[in-house]
Amino acid sequence: MVAIPGHRVSAKTVAVHPLRFAPSGALLNWLGVLSAASAVCVVAGLVVAPARIWPGILLVSLYLVGMGLAGIFFVALQYAAGATWSVAFRRVPESLASVLPVGALGLAAVFLLHPAVYPWWSGLPGEAEGAQAFKAIWLSPVFFLARAAVYLIAWMLFAAAIVRNSRRQDADGNAAHTLRNVRLSVAFFPVFAVTVCLASFDWIMSLEPKWYSTIFGVYNFAGLFTGGLAGIIVLVVLLCNLGPRGMGPLHGVASPEHLHDLGKLLFGFCTFWMYIWFAQYMLIWYANIPEETTYYVARLRGLWAPLFVLNVCLNWVVPFLVLLPQGTKRAPRVIVKVALVVLAGRYLDLYLMVMPPFAGASPVFGLWELAPVVLGGGVLALVVLRTLASAAIIPQRDPLLANSLHHHQ
């Protein structure tokens, strides 16, 4: 993989010669075959080993939804802050947002076809008094499904509206689309904050309904956004280098300065993730309340313990140590490897949140766990590549594009 070039194209050149990304047919065919083969395995698993395949579908769907949410959150954050540096590669996080409906479809399949993954679906044991009574109401199936529909529909509507305005600006050059997206982005943040927190409680924490953590929603936000930043970095570097003689559609557009800022964001949010991780763990350990400690006791036994430690290494130790020097944030070969590590860490983080109630004393990872992962990865790549190819790779009529092309530290 070659370095991101130092020279840049001008805004005038971009306007006259809009660049398109055209993924190779061979790559798309290969991804299609891989996705189809893994889909067959998933269907077979639904018949042969449903107790193992359904948690895997839930896990991968949560991963995809998180990537999609991170993409649209990044775009909304840039609009609301009036940021100009990221305009040149905005199509990348927009393409991640297109994964939202795929993840939503996977979650809908779990909720509607196999809700038994949630132990409370047939009712909570014990007397319905106090907090238990509220929990029984909150986790009633109809209310649960209604909330899930509200979360997913709200996210997809905001994502579709923001991306649509961005694409319309390419067609007519009307700066009013930017103003509309600023307003939509500001409105999106409170909706995002509340729904992501509640969805984390509903879809992940309720897998162990007796356990609770008030910081769990913030923890999941930190995880999904670090994963999204890592995905953006991987795509930006690839789009700079995929093409004849290593000259991809973002060659000369995304500069070392852009990569440096993305690296600083990844470094900062990985450290934020670690801060929230430690805050949750330390407070539960110190309080030593049985209803809370059972979560960590299960994850520190047997073969779960090495994965517990590896989770911290992938999501914080590696990115912190490698990205601490300034030069590594500007080195494509280095930062893309760190981003791949963080993407793997995001999966492991979700794995440790979702799988212990199903796997028991030891983690299990075989064909039935691998098939949903391969299917999710193949579909993610296909959707992102096709979305990137559906419009100009650079928002060439954005009034802030010139500032982004000449961005410097």
Image (cartoon, rainbow, N blue to C red):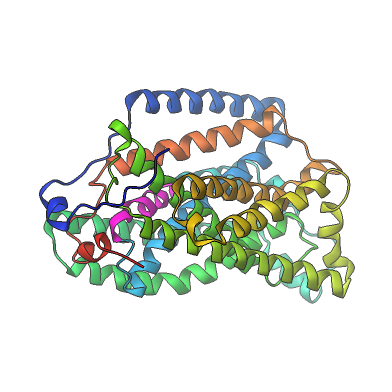
For the residue pair 145 and 189, the one nearer the viewer reads as 189
Q: Which residues are magenta?
A: 87-101
Q: Is residue 270 left or right of residue 124?
A: left
For the residue pair 287 and 323, the one nearer the viewer reads as 323
The chief SS type of the magenta part is: helix
Which residue is at 49% across, 64% downward? 265
Tally of numbered tags: 0
For the residue pair 399 and 113, the one nearer the viewer reads as 399
Q: Position of residue 336 (x, y in %)?
A: 49, 46
The answer to whether residue 151 is seen in the rendering is: yes
For the residue pair 318 and 309, the one nearer the viewer reads as 318
Magenta stretch holds residue 133: no
| Rendered-image quadrant of the N terminus | top left
Compared to residue 360, the image places residue 184 above or below, namely: below
Quarter of the image for residue 164 reads bottom left
Q: Position of residue 268 (x, y in %)?
A: 55, 66
The answer to whether residue 203 is seen in the rendering is: no
Which residue is at 44% across, 38% downward? 381
Which residue is at 72% across, 35% downward? 52
| Rendered-image quadrant of the C terminus | bottom left
Q: Is residue 369 left or right of residue 5?
A: right
Quarter of the image for residue 26 reads top left
Q: Position of residue 262 (x, y in %)?
A: 44, 59
Q: Position of residue 251 (x, y in %)?
A: 29, 45
